[in-house]
Image: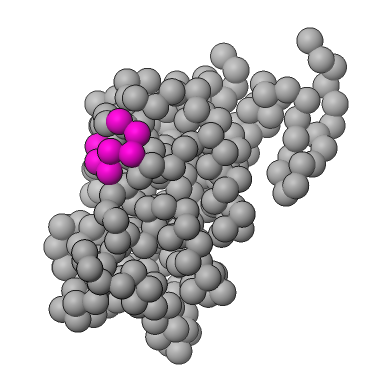
Amino acid sequence: MLPHTQPGTVGNRVAFPDDRDRNAATLDVMRIGAHVRQDADPIGAGERLGADIVQLFLTDPQKWDKPEPHPQADQIRQSPIDVVVHSSYVINVASLNNRLRMPSRKAVAEQAAAAADIGAIGLVVHGGHVRDGENPAAGVANWRKLFERQQDKGGFPVPILVENTAGGDFAMARHLDAIARLWDAIGEFGAGFCLDTCHAWAGGEELLGIVERVKAITGRIDLVHLNNSRDEFDSARDRHANLTTGLIDPAMLTAVVSAAGAPVVLETPADGIADDLAYLRGALSGD
């Protein structure tokens, strides 16, 4: 076995003498947790899972409802468990349809304010898309307008974490070249990035080296949604699987986590999340 040595650097990341040392050091500082379905008691759910971080919705993800003050806001703010908020699925900032784009902008602002009220570390927002035949550049411009207009109001109170998506030929954040065009427009506003492993796989992006390729574009990965996939590579289908039961090699998922060095949220099927957390921690520690 190699003797312990101090880590060096390769580019912007720390390099360890072997994978086990690197993974163990990653585990020491990483926040690992899950999306909790018991949104009424997110901290309790996180404590039962032994999570360091939980993700939750603050309103019905399939509706346009404005978030109400969370009944456990004080407990959430005071807990050592970090919290990140996932925005509603109906939001599509990129849309060229005024009846969708304008309420989307309003919803992002409202949900960011509600996320700040509970002390969340960020608000995850899907990249969205334009319709077939529409110019994706116009969708990118709409994303820029979201940040420009909010900047005039003092900016967002929490980081907006743009999440890569699984499908759509006219999506803003499916392929890395599209993400690069989006980042050219919004990167100056401090936008964050959420890397979803299932979405990348289903979207046709190889996971080997994905962290380095994303960071070359965005300069950052703020959150990892760690999910396996029920479907084939480049399927454009967003169906999550537990870490050891999907079509992605679980060792590749662990490698993404180790390379990203960012907080990790599991969005895997609820019945297996506790096992997924145990698997990931074991894999990172070398057990």
Q: Is residue 71 visible?
A: no
Range of the magenta residues?
A: 232-239
Question: Residue 275, image x and y in percent?
Answer: 36, 21
Name above or below for residue 78 compared with residue 115.
above
Q: Quadrant of residue 24?
A: top right
Residue under the point 23% across and 58% down: 89
Name above or below for residue 279 compared with residue 212.
above
Q: Quadrant of residue 57?
A: bottom left
Residue under the point 43% across and 42% down: 205
Predominant SS along the magenta part: loop
Residue under the point 24% across and 41% down: 237
Question: Residue 126, image x and y in percent?
Answer: 33, 58
Q: Is residue 10 left or right of residue 38?
A: right
In reply to whether residue 236 is colored magenta, the answer given is yes
Quarter occupied by the C terminus: top right
In reply to whether residue 179 is colored magenta, the answer given is no
Name above or below for residue 91 compared with residue 176.
below
Q: Is residue 183 left or right of residue 85?
A: right
- Looking at the image, the residue that sits furthest to the bottom is 152
Residue under the point 27% across and 43% down: 236
**Front-most of 215 and 77?**
215
Q: Quadrant of residue 45?
A: top left
Q: Is residue 251 left or right of residue 268?
A: right
